[in-house]
Image: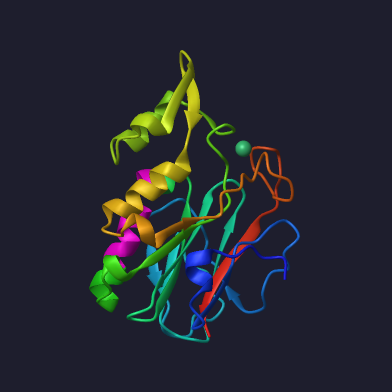
Amino acid sequence: MSYLKAGNLERFSSIEHGFGTASSLWPEDIILMSQKHTNNVLIIEDEQGDYIPVADALLTSKPDKLLGVKTADCLPILLYNPVTKVVGVIHAGWRGLANMVILNTMDKLRTFYNADPGSTYFSIGPGICKNCYEVGMEVVDSINTAIAVKDAFRQTSKDQGLLDTRSIAERQIQAAGVPASNISHVNLCTRCSPGFYSYRAGSKERQVSYITIR
Ligand SMILES: [Zn+2]
């Protein structure tokens, strides 16, 4: 198994998860989304058929559903609430962060499953790092309206700088009420660490990350 594991999720024997690399084989029967950098959260409790909905987050309490997220620089985020036994995946790039996909997902967890953020565990997977992710000021301005980027942005020229989406994602998870001690990182960069597909590096492929209830 060429999947990377998160310490705070691996200790739960009731779930199985993994962050994919370029060499990971995609699991069979994985449920994927048509990812469009939205804040759409889809609750998967019934049969989906062949329909692939536009969404950037999935939640389920069903043991036979294997939720997946494809990435190549954006952050794959996996979550688990052991009290309500709900798992989820989130696709979070800068647009998703600006669209508040994380807060929206925690909101659905709370309203649909009655899950408490205080007992929810998040792991942020491999994505482009703060030294590799050069963006224009319009990106910073877009995110800033959702959450202050402050120290997550380092200006390098008049209209460009380096953005730290990992730290913005972590702050948004905490803003949703999740304690910092419940959040873990697989702190690898899809662009400057070997073994990953990177959109910025010209890759058309995606790695896949997943989570499921045993
Ligand atoms: Zn990097």
Which residue is found at the position 70% from the left and 52% from the top?
205
Question: What main secondary structure does the magenta stretch of the protein show?
Answer: helix
Q: Give x and y (percent) for residue 35.
A: 51, 57
The verdict on residue 98 being magenta is yes
The verdict on residue 56 being magenta is no
Which of the 4 image quadrants contains residue 132? top right
Q: Is residue 98 above or below residue 150?
A: below
Which residue is found at the position 40% from the left and 66% from the top?
121
Q: Is residue 94 visible?
A: no
Q: Is residue 115 above or below residue 57?
A: below
- Out of 171 and 210, give the one closest to the viewer: 171
Q: Give x and y (percent) for residue 125.
A: 54, 55
Q: Residue furthest top?
A: 158
Which residue is found at the position 43% from the left and 74% from the top?
87
- How many discs mark residues in the rendered view? 0
Q: Give x and y (percent) for residue 12.
A: 48, 78
Q: Is residue 189 above or below residue 110?
A: above
Q: Give x and y (percent) for residue 50.
A: 57, 77
- The quadrant of the rendered image in which ligand 1 is seen is top right
Quarter in which the N terminus is drawn: bottom right
For the record, the magenta segment spans 97-108
Q: Is residue 49 above or below residue 122?
A: below
Which of the 4 image quadrants contains residue 193? top right
Q: How is the image coloured?
A: rainbow
Q: Is residue 131 visible?
A: yes
Horizontal relation, residue 82 to residue 176: left or right: right
Horizontal relation, residue 45 to residue 187: left or right: left
